[in-house]
Amino acid sequence: MPLSLLLNWRLHLLVIIASVISEWIGIINIPLGPGALLLLPLFYAFIIAVLINPYLFKGTKRWVPIEVSMAASPLILVSILPFIARFGTTIGPAIEDIINAGPALLLQELGNLGTMIIALPVAVLLLKMGRETIGATFSIAREPNIAIISDKYGLKGPEGIGVMGVYVVGTMFGTLWFALMASFIMSLDLFDPRALAMACGVGSGSMVAACSGALANMAPEIEETLLAFAGASNLLTYATGLYLSLFVALPIAERFYGALTRRRLAAAVAAGDTTAGTAPDFQDEPSETDDLRPENHLGHACVVVAAVCFVAWLSNAAAGIALMDALPGMIILYVMTIIGLVVTRFMPFYLPSVAWVSLVSIVLTLPWIPGSEWMLKHLAQVNFLAIVTPVLAYAGLALTPREFTMFRRTGWKLIITALLVFTGTFVGSAIIADILL
């Protein structure tokens, strides 16, 4: 794709406006019983971008040309790389705590594979969903998981629709669901409360807070213990979750989906449905090609990453951090991202750019690396979630008629699948933690 299209001023201006408005609105917390309905700026950015998408309303094409949507697609992966770098910088400083963690905390992360044990069979066999189930069920669909799907399949394919659908559901209802689920399961007295606290750590920060808070409310005498276990588990989820999802969960989801679809086809044929499997499906359409990967065009990538870092810098300022205070931190993230892309390009074996960018940022912020303390001081001025808000704006603008059709077809199914994913993850992690305690 031409560099001039990737640097389309109207696209980046629209993303800046959507991100700044979203950050100004801030977090809206609506209490609902033991939990809450939590609305985050990145959710607003996605909705705003969808509403001005030129494919949704004909009138918007006058102000938002089709070229804007075309350029937004490859920028999704590029724009999420600085966030992945920032994500990695939270792991490096805590490496000693992670190493010292007990086996129960380390191994219960395998419970994350519970995302697909319940959800994937229901989605394929009962809801008759296609490859969107892979993106929807291989993980709990937080920001690093979106990066994995974006790198491997692109967010415009069915897998991307799946992960984005679960992400949106989790952003809106995840805190409420985890609070209700944790309270109910603890009332059954089936698990050690510490195991349930560790299971709380599989989600985002807001999910962890709601989940562990609900448990602490039911067992105030061990509140500090429960919160400590939940926090340690969440740290390990961020440290190991990306690699577990990339190298274990996603390949298993692919094979599991293949086995279930073969079974679904065989059952349909046995029932006399001769058209089963012959109708055109979204899963047969090609994903984005390797030509769009930023590491294959390093010269263009240096310029485009600078552009998306500039957008993220302004979004970070809208979150309340002074521009000049955050500038050194954004430059550090830019350098880490470019190093990660260079490593991806020249390594003799392939790993996705998100993995290399994450590893680079982890290594550079290890406690014994010279200059790591200076970098962490400046990185503290870069809001963890504010720099991912523009990513959701790019994603909303990148949707095409095909994606809107897919959303209409699978929207309610994705809500059911998302809730099953959250339940499977929590219960799977709790079972493993309970066995190991």
Image: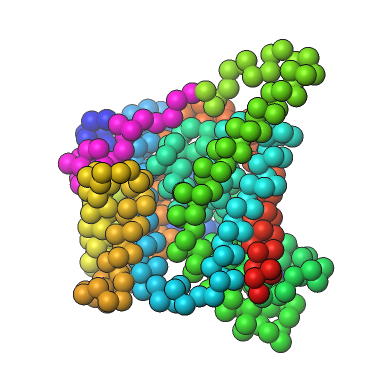
The C terminus sits in image quarter: bottom right
Rendering coords of residue 153 (x, y %):
44, 36
Name the residue: 63% across, 51% down: 115
- Total marks shown come to 0
Rendering coords of residue 180 (x, y %):
73, 63
**Relative to the observer, which residue lies in front, 32 or 204?**
204
Q: Is residue 256 left or right of residue 328?
A: right
Name the residue: 24% across, 50% down: 343
Please identify the residue farthest to the left as the structure is shown.
Answer: 299
Q: Can residue 39 be seen by looking at this rendering?
A: yes
Q: How is the image coloured?
A: rainbow
Please identify the residue farthest to the bottom as the structure is shown.
Answer: 221
Q: Is residue 168 left or right of residue 177?
A: left
> What segment is highlighted magenta in the picture?
285-303
**Relative to the observer, which residue lies in front, 143 or 425?**
425
Residue 293 lies in the magenta-colored region = yes
Name the residue: 27% across, 76% down: 368
Name the residue: 51% across, 49% down: 248
In this rendering, the answer to whether 188 lies above or below 343 is below
Q: Quadrant of residue 365?
A: bottom left
What type of secondary structure mainly makes up the magenta span? helix
Q: Can residue 310 be seen by looking at this rendering?
A: no
Q: Is residue 339 left or right of residue 97?
A: left
Please identify the residue farthest to the right as the structure is shown.
Answer: 188
Residue 298 lies in the magenta-colored region = yes
Please identify the residue farthest to the top as the structure is shown.
Answer: 274
Q: Quadrant of residue 198?
A: bottom right
Q: Is residue 237 left or right of residue 358?
A: right
Rendering coords of residue 109 (x, y %):
56, 62
Rendering coords of residue 216 (x, y %):
68, 78
The N terminus sits in image quarter: top left
